[in-house]
Image: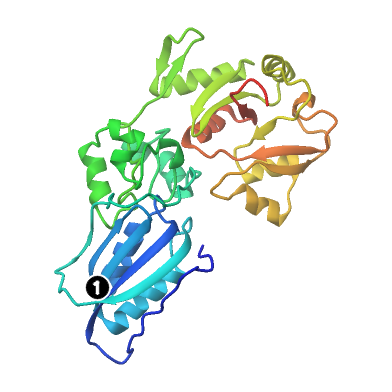
Amino acid sequence: MILTPRIFCWTALNLMSDRRIRCRYRLNGAVQGVGFRPFVYHIAIEHKLKGWVRNDAAGIVIEVEGSAANITDFEKQLRQNSPQNAVINHFESENLAVRNDPSFRILESDHSETLSVSVLPDLAVCPECIAEMNDPAEGRRYRYPFINCTNCGPRFTIITGLPYDRPRTTMDAFAMCDACRAEYEDPMDRRFHAQPIACVKCGPHLELWDIDGKIMATHDDALMQAVRAIGQGKILAVKGLGGFHLLADAANEDAVQLLRQRKCRPRKPFAVMVSSREEAGKYCDLSEDETMLLSLPAAPIVLLHKKLNIKMAKSIAPDNPYLGVILPYTPLHHLILQELKTPVIATSGNRRD
């Protein structure tokens, strides 16, 4: 999405000329962690342009060199077809002297200026990653609970510094395997410069802990034991993006009451996580706008009107005609709900308020 720019300088170009020119673009806003550099790389190659793109302390800087007509088309795409999660607050351009760069490159980030770039929030896992996670043929990422790509996954939660590059995230502790490194460096791959890139060979893995912090299970066995625990009416603390979720079976009245007791929350409604928009429609009335809201990358909780006589614990939202509904936004949440096959209470891990 492009907001009205505070500063904009249109580069005057002669569309009938094939003369070689060079332009610099500066874009500020939420332009890091959204796949902007790979996007720029692709449209620069498409238009046979030379130059470079890099992150800096304020956003994105681009220099391109080529025919005036091709740069005009490049600039049009830059302004109108930016990545879906990008927000451009400031766009400016200027003419430069031709330097005859031999190719187009993604450069290392510039850390020399005062930081002013916007930090993007975590993004819900995208449909492409969900499909890959559920495909046995994918191997390294089949049922991998930390799958992500350039268009989805953690951002704010893993950042330790800016500009947004892997060494300035908590993922720096995980050395990429050869396969992940190849994807990360391939301009044609959808994980090109995806900073949280990982797989079962080189990334983080699941562990199930008991109340004393003892490891009870790891990897997929940890997932299955956790699902069984929820089905038995137990409360599960899930470490996810932005903190901990407490999960409990939304159809189990005893489990919901126990959760209320432990959180010191006698009546305030709980949010419910359902596996899909279709499942949300089984429990609530859904308008077209509400369906759209549920599917946003921000994965908001949407207040929906409950249907009558639904199979959920009465104490989820006592004496309330509405239900706060959220879709799973991490791969781990998707895997839990796929196995459990029932909605869950999904509430914050803090004790109350």
Residue at left offset 63%, top offset 45%: 277
Q: Quadrant of residue 106?
A: bottom left
Q: Quadrant of residue 160?
A: top left
Is residue 30 placed above or below 65 in the rendered structure?
above
Q: Residues within 10 Å of mark 1 (few under 14, many from 20)?
A: many
Residue at left offset 72%, top offset 41%: 282
Is residue 300 placed above or below 11 in the rendered structure?
above
Report the side of 195 relative to 1 (left or right): left
- State how the image is colored: rainbow
> Number of marks in the image?
1
Please tell me whether mark 1 sits on a helix, a strand or a loop.
loop
Quickly name the residue at label 1: 49
Report the side of 296 relative to 239 (left or right): right
Of 39 and 55, the residue lying toward us: 55
Q: Position of residue 93 (x, y in %)?
A: 36, 73
Mark 1: which amino acid?
Leu
Furthest residue in direction bottom, as rendered = 16
Report the side of 283 relative to 204 (left or right): right
